[in-house]
Amino acid sequence: MSALSIKNLRKVYQGGLEALKGIDLEVEKGDFFALLGPNGAGKSTTIGIISSLVTKSSGKVEILGIDIDDNHSLAKKKLGVVGQEVNFNQFEKVGDIIRNQAGYYGLSFREARENTMYYMKKLDIWDKRNEQARKLSGGMKRRIMVAKALVNKPELLILDEPTAGVDIELRRSLWDFLTEINNSGTSIILTTHYLEEAERLCRNIAIIDNGEIVENTSMQELLTRLEVETFVFDLEEDISNLPVIENYELKIENPKKISVTIKKGQGLNEIFSLLSNSGIKIASMRNETGRLEELFLGLVESTIKEDSHGPH
């Protein structure tokens, strides 16, 4: 059974604007799935239709095998959505906001209380439970929205730009939490403009542009298409200059860190040997973020070129 199944989904607005041009999408149960695209591509419209905030023009949407048209109430119970905008009364106390949300799903008072406490503690907002939400930072409000979306323990969670505007520390702690609940069985769909976020968290990815799915594959397969990759090496000792190594681009980031650009087909073992022979000792290595952004821009640009050469 899929967590989400979309067939030939279309949305035409007044005036003939096609926000969605018949998209098909399958998200497997237990997946952590990225839905990416530029502004205006159709991501928010798709999420709006799934969550019943936008009316589709045609097509079929199923959440955990339940058609959203045939059994709307049951489908919604399977779904949690964290939108981009704050969607709660900021004059209410934090604990009341989350607990009251549980009531909309028919949870008993005991279940609502237990679930509220559990997610507030997991998201580090338990000590804010008696404060008015308007007094909290943007990052804390974002955590309230996540707890609110999860209070009924949905099987599918959709996150629309969940870390927009939050600091790095908060973002990384949220990454850890989302990975934990995904490992526990919650299917997650993520939209984000922080492309390193998708690369870090997601196993599969679809890219939407101009109302159409232009790519749908695994994150691993997509990243193999890179023409170049940049690796960052942390060094055991300070260096002040670098050897010239043919066919590799090396750069000193700071006395104990260098970056190396490797072209497709070149191997890491070779650069390790060359650096070692030059007396440079490597302590650790990691990929530089931004790899997915390079691919994303390339895919969108190729789509634009194809459209410009098509029939008019």
Image: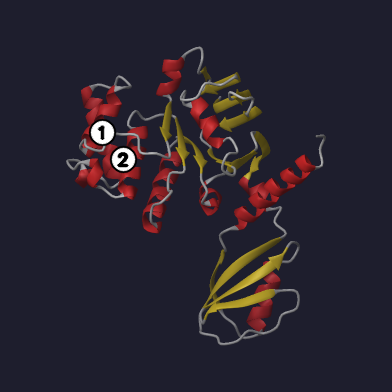
Residue in the picture at 55% in, 36% down: 43
Q: Nearer the viewer, residue 88 or 248?
A: 88
Which residue, given by chain and number where applicable, does mark 2 sit on?
Answer: 144
Gap in Å between the C-alphas at discs 1 and 2?
A: 8 Å
Numbered disc 2: secondary structure: helix
Q: Is residue 196 found left or right of 249 in the rendered image?
A: left
Residue 112 placed where, x, y %?
25, 28
Residue placed furthest toward the top: 70
Q: Nearer the viewer, residue 53 or 108?
A: 53
Is there any visible trace of residue 244 in the rendered image?
yes
Residue 78 placed where, x, y %?
43, 25
Task: Name the amino acid type tagged 2.
Answer: Ile
Residue 158 placed where, x, y %?
47, 35
Asked if the residue at tag 2 contacts the one at tag 1, i.e. Cβ–Cβ closer than 8 Å, the answer is yes
The quarter of the image holding the N terminus is top right
Task: Name the amino acid type tagged 1.
Answer: Ile
Coloration of the structure image: secondary structure
Which residue, given by chain and number where applicable, does mark 1 sit on?
Answer: 97
Residue in the picture at 71% in, 74% down: 248
Where 156 sits versus 142, above or below?
Answer: above
Residue placed furthest toward the front: 15
Numbered disc 1: secondary structure: helix
Q: Residues within 10 Å of mark 2 (few under 14, many from 20)?
A: many
The quarter of the image holding the C terminus is top right
Label drawn at residue 147: none
Where 241 sits versus 272, above or below?
Answer: below
Residue 127 placed where, x, y %?
20, 46
Q: Earlier in the sequence, mark 1 or mark 2?
A: 1
Where 299 sits versus 119, above or below?
Answer: below
